[in-house]
Image (cartoon, grey):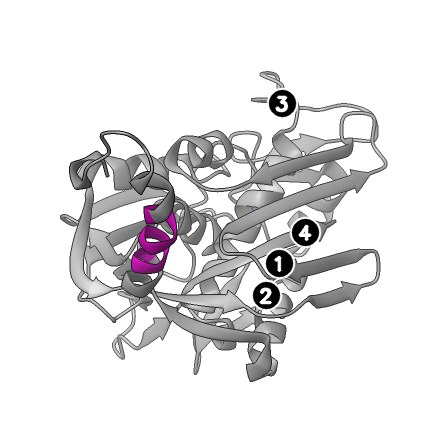
Amino acid sequence: MAFQTTIRIDVSITGIGLHSGEPATVRLVPSAPGSGISFVRMDRKDRVLIPAKAENVVSTRLATTLGFGDSTISTVEHLLAALAGHGIDNLLVEVSGPELPILDGSAREFSDAILKVGIQTQLSSRQYIRIKKKIELRLGEKWAVIEPSDHFELHSSIEFDHPSIGYQENTFIGGVNQFTEIAAARTFCLLKDVEAMRRMGLAKGGSLKNAVVVDDAHILNPEGLRCSDEFARHKALDALGDFKLSGLNILGSFRLHRSGHDLNTQLIARIFSDPSNYEIVDGTKLAAQKKATKRPMLSVARGATASSY
Ligand SMILES: [Zn+2]
């Protein structure tokens, strides 16, 4: 896509916060070209804008938390994944308190809200980050590799010693249809971790309504899984959300194994740590290049005209 986008009109989504258990609302507001994605807490007097950028990540424990000064906003990753999936460049996200609603633990309601109000193309070209060389990152058993590509591709795999999980993988190459497949994949957690979080006063809003919960041998949700590879799909969803913290769209082929918010956000920081890792390219120029490379093939096709494009 050559041009930037926002949404057509405001839309609000309400639920409860995962950790507080209190009601939480986000209002998505269209924003000007070049403004990017920013969050603002409406319960604070300072109304400080927190850009959705990797340098503003203050915690990746349990969820991705953004912050600026003493203003923090948690659980931003599933909304960011929906914005990435639908290619939204510019948006103001007004949040009623310190965390976004967890909803059903997936990005489905955010995705549906964007589709309901529609996407507005803006008259400014989109900027891309094109990866120029191989980048690798390892954190213990987790690892990531990015290789140059003219497209965005994300290959995710998980390996979890549990009879319901085991080894699973997912390949995401973009498009609304494929995004819809992963948008509904819910977050998952171990029962013993939920119990430990509760003891620390966290996850007060957590329940089988907003996570797949597994004990040592079983999935505890009575409805079971939404798809057999729901765990791998959710890993892809989280990565899409965290990669949105690059501030731009990335052209590169990603391979992630056992990824988490820490690996994803550190990977984005790694890209920017060395200017020779990437170049910024203009979406309209990319579109013109693609058209130019296609033209010789089309010109030999009998009867092909400009209107065939
Ligand atoms: Zn998640």
The residue sitting at 59% across, 76% down in the picture is 277
Picture quadrant where residue 46 is located: bottom left
In reply to whether residue 72 is colored magenta, the answer given is: no
Q: Report which residue position mark 1 lands on.
A: 261
Residue at 58% across, 70% down:
132
Q: Is residue 292 magenta?
A: yes
* Precedes in sequence: disc 2 or disc 4: 4
* Residues tagged 3 and 1 counted as in contact (Cβ below 8 A): no
Q: Residue at x 55, y 58 (%)?
A: 252
Measure the alpha-carbon separation of dots 3 and 2: 30 Å
Please give the range of residues in magenta.
287-295
Q: Residue furthest top?
A: 223
Tag 1 and tag 2, C-beta contact below 8 Å:
yes
On the question of residue 146 being in view, the answer is: yes
Q: Secondary structure at mark 4?
A: strand
Say if disc 1 is inside 8 Å of ligand 1: yes
Is tag 3's residue or tag 2's residue first in the polypeptide sequence?
3
Q: Of circles 1 and 4, which is in front?
A: 4
Question: Label 1: how many residues lie within 10 Å, few (<14), some (14-19) or many (20+)?
Answer: many
Q: Secondary structure at mark 3?
A: loop
Q: Is residue 95 visible?
A: no
User: Seen in the image, is 74 located left or right of residue 9?
Assistant: right
- In x, y percent, where is residue 78? 46, 48
Q: Residues within 10 Å of mark 2 (few under 14, many from 20)?
A: many
Q: Pointer 3: residues within 10 angstroms few (<14), some, or many (20+)?
A: some
Tell me how far mark 3 sits from mark 1, CA to CA: 24 Å
Say if 135 sits above or below 226 in the image.
Answer: below
Q: Nearer the viewer, residue 114 or 277?
A: 277
From the image, tell me which residue sits under label 3.
Answer: 221
* Label 2 SS: helix
Residue flagged by tag 2: what amino acid is it?
Thr
Three-letter amino acid code at the position of disc 1: His
